[in-house]
Image: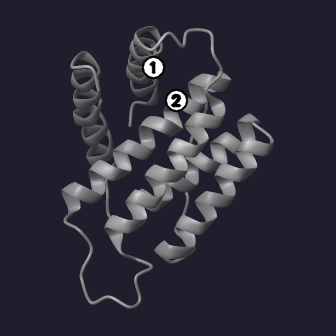
Amino acid sequence: MNLEKLFQLQENLNGHIEKEHNLEHTSLLSEKILALQVELAELANETKCFKFWSCKPSSNKEIVLEEFADCLHFILSLGLEKGFTTIRIKPKDIQYDITSQFLNLYVDINDFFICSSSDHYITLFEDFLALGKSLNFSAEDIENAYLTKNCINHKRQNEGY
């Protein structure tokens, strides 16, 4: 996955949004943290991993992958907000079931909010990509989904979303 390219694309989208909504030079850390938490909940909802009371299967791969890409937009945006764009991400082995991975990501998000260090950001990013691996997404799947959703997000902004 080409993180440099993804950060650049996200920076372009952020710039467009900030200009259109008169938010240039405004810290949006709290908003981005909450947005990531909401998107992560939407992702969990599509996987249905926690719905022990339901017999319905997970949504199809494309829908789950689109929600994953939504989360990635905010993770990249957080990195840009804090200047963490030259990070090194190391693949992690999957150690937990999917429900536990979601819960762990909420802890990671909280840790990053409390102390927005590069170490906390890297942990969040690595754990997020490990979740993607658990959901059977390849790096290519993730990057392509991000690129597709990034185009949709630009289109939405151009249409007054």
- Judge left or right: residue 99 versus residue 122: left
Three-letter residue code for mark 2:
Ser
Q: Identify residue for label 2.
A: 77
In primary-sequence order, the first of circles 2 and 1 is: 1
Q: Identify residue for label 1.
A: 14
Three-letter residue code for mark 1:
Asn
Residue 137 image point, x, y percent: 31, 57
Q: How many marks?
A: 2
Q: Secondary structure at mark 2?
A: helix
Distance Cα–Cα, label 2 vs label 1:
7 Å
Instruction: Tell me which residue sits at (45%, 14%) in the image.
Output: 21
Residue 60 image point, x, y percent: 19, 65
- Occupied quadrant, residue 155: top left
Instruction: Tell me which residue sits at (65%, 50%) in the image.
Output: 109
Q: Quadrant of the C terminus?
A: top left
Q: Dot 1, crowdedness within 10 Å: few (<14), some or many (≥20)?
A: many
As displayed, is residue 50 above or below residue 4? below
Return the residue nearer the eye: 106 or 120.
106
As displayed, is residue 53 above or below residue 100? below
Q: Quadrant of the N terminus?
A: top left
Render colour scheme: one colour
Return the residue nearer the eye: 99 or 126.
99
Q: Dot 2, crowdedness within 10 Å: few (<14), some or many (≥20)?
A: many
Residue 131 image point, x, y percent: 46, 61
Decide if residue 90 is in sight here: no
